[in-house]
Image (tube, rainbow, N blue to C red):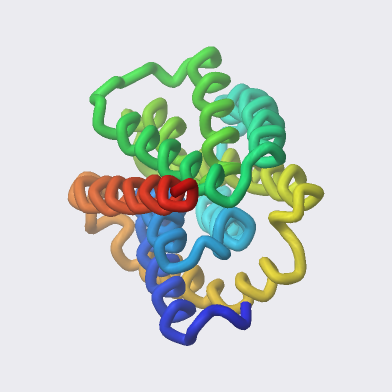
Amino acid sequence: MSELSLLQILLANLALLAGACLQGVAGYGIGTLAAPLMFVISPVFLPGAMIINAVLMNLLMLVRNRASLSFRPVRYAIGGNIVGTVLAGFTLALLSEQGFALAFGALILLAVALSVIGYRPQLSARNSVVAGGASGYMGTITAVGGPPMGLIYQNETGPRMRANLAAFFLFGSCASIVVLAPAGYVGIEQLRLVAVTFPGVLVGFWLSGFVVNRLPFAAFRPIVLAVAALAGFAALVRGLLGYL
């Protein structure tokens, strides 16, 4: 953490604040908005510190919306998530620093594409397994696992949707940590990073309680996707320059 400046830590907190507030409103978004920004601020935040912050955020979300939780629709997605997370672990074991930047950028742009194509799959067992697998793979590598699940939950609203997504992402984030820790992506250094960035998550979660029923996610969606796309391109450029 010594290579990070106070400005970088402050910017990371602001990114997490915005992402946590978005997730408190929409049920997902801390990864979609904050992770690409944090990669641009410094790649050291990804994926470990970002995913640990996501675990804490989803725990807060689950506590807030626990009365609306319906676990049955979530279990199929969790099954798919396990497979996707394991595959992501094998992928990360093979990637160099430049390879990680390229994979990060490509998967971020894929997440943006999934969000804008307008495809509206039904919330079924089969689609939940597929979305859960895609979310596990993308979330473990980039900490952005929301868009695949957002596709199948886009017709759902309210506390039940937020509770179910929080339960899924809490499991998925914990599974990612189990896979990332042996690979060296989660350790003491990442915990130190979380200690100085979690205040942003707390403030964002707190703010979301005031706006959850006042500001629709659709109002923020174009901005979130534009930010993610720009950061994805920046990661691709960084990865390509590393090979030159």
Q: Residue 43 placed where, x, y %?
A: 52, 61
- Residue 68: tell me if it is visible: no
- Asked whether, in this view, residue 225 is left or right of residue 24, the answer is left
State which quarter of the image contains the N terminus.
bottom right
Quadrant for residue 52, please give it.
bottom right
Residue name at image x 58 percent, y 30 percent: 74
- Asked whether, in this view, residue 229 is left or right of residue 21, the answer is left
Q: Residue pushed farthest top?
A: 126
- Residue 58: tell me if it is visible: yes
- Asked whether, in this view, residue 170 is left or right of residue 180, the answer is left
Q: Residue pushed farthest front?
A: 244
Residue name at image x 41 percent, y 69 percent: 17
Residue 200 sits above or below residue 231 on the image: below
Residue name at image x 40 percent, y 75 percent: 11
- Please give the count of numbered marks on the rendered protein: 0
Q: Residue 154 placed where, x, y %?
A: 33, 32
Residue 80 sits above or below residue 137 on the image: above
Q: Residue 112 placed where, x, y %?
A: 32, 38
Nearest the eye: 145 or 164: 145
Residue 35 sits above or below residue 128 on the image: below
Residue 235 sits above or below residue 11 on the image: above
Nearest the eye: 226 or 91: 91
Quadrant for residue 94, please give it.
top right
Q: Residue pushed farthest bottom?
A: 6
